[in-house]
Amino acid sequence: MPEHAPILPRDGASLHALHATRIAAQALRVLPIGYWQRRLAARAFSLELMPVMPRESLHVQARRLADHPGVWLLVTEAMAWGLVPWVWSGPLDRRVDGARAAMRAFQRAAPRAFGAVLFVTAPDDTTTRAVLHRIRPVGLAATYLAIGAVSWDQLDECFEDAADDLPQAGARAAALRASRRLAQLTTACP
């Protein structure tokens, strides 16, 4: 049996989560780190535990992981972010195993010790946040890896704010594009 269940969405909400993750990763690599990291942390973890970055910092590398093509790795000077679409369904153990495998793939690929994994979910998904406690790492990894969930409408809110707030024309345009595309996903969600 393989170590991980592949990210192969089988329903509309999972496909939307996959698209929302890609849209967010592409936009976040353009936005200033200091702008988006605390906003995402506030939505995903209900607190601001991210290291402070200069608002104008733009050094973000983004790439998809080869062994989990739906997982995006965003690397900043201070930490690594993993954006993971929530695509698992069925029995709870199967969903938890798939999410843990994606989290381990992120940990293997992340070049920074401090990191955060954000599971991207549908706006009305209540089950994912309820099972996050079963996915959390244990031991030493628990001290430097935060696990949370963010819905694509929350990502849309973050990009709407960025389109209004940021002075850089390129960042504003990227945020506006991402916001529009995420809004289309929200209206098209099954």
Image: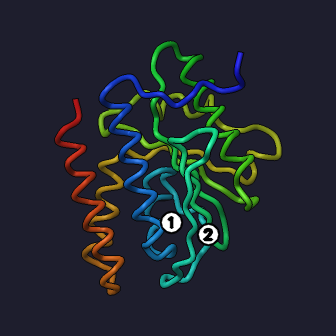
Q: Residue furthest right?
A: 140
Please tell me whether residue 44 is drawn above or below residue 173 in the rendered image.
Answer: above
Q: CA distance from mark 2 to mark 1?
A: 10 Å
Horizontal and vertical percent for residue 88?
Answer: 48, 25
In-front residue for pair 166/25: 25
Residue drawn where x is 74% and y is 60% of the image: 111
Instruction: Give the residue pinned by disc 1.
Output: 37
Residue drawn where x is 27% and y is 51% of the image: 182
In-front residue for pair 22/186: 22
Please identify the quarter of the rendering in which residue 115 is found: bottom right
Q: Residue furthest front?
A: 66
- Quadrant showing the N terminus: top right
Horizontal and vertical percent for residue 55?
Answer: 49, 82
Contact (Cβ within 8 Å) of mark 2 with mark 1:
yes
Closest to the camera, between mark 2 and mark 1, is 2
Q: Is residue 163 left or right of residue 171?
A: left
Horizontal and vertical percent for residue 6?
Answer: 57, 28
Instruction: Give the residue pinned by disc 2.
Output: 76
Residue drawn where x is 38% and y is 31% of the image: 14
Crowd class of label 2 (few under 14; some 14 to 19; many from 20; radius 10 Å): many
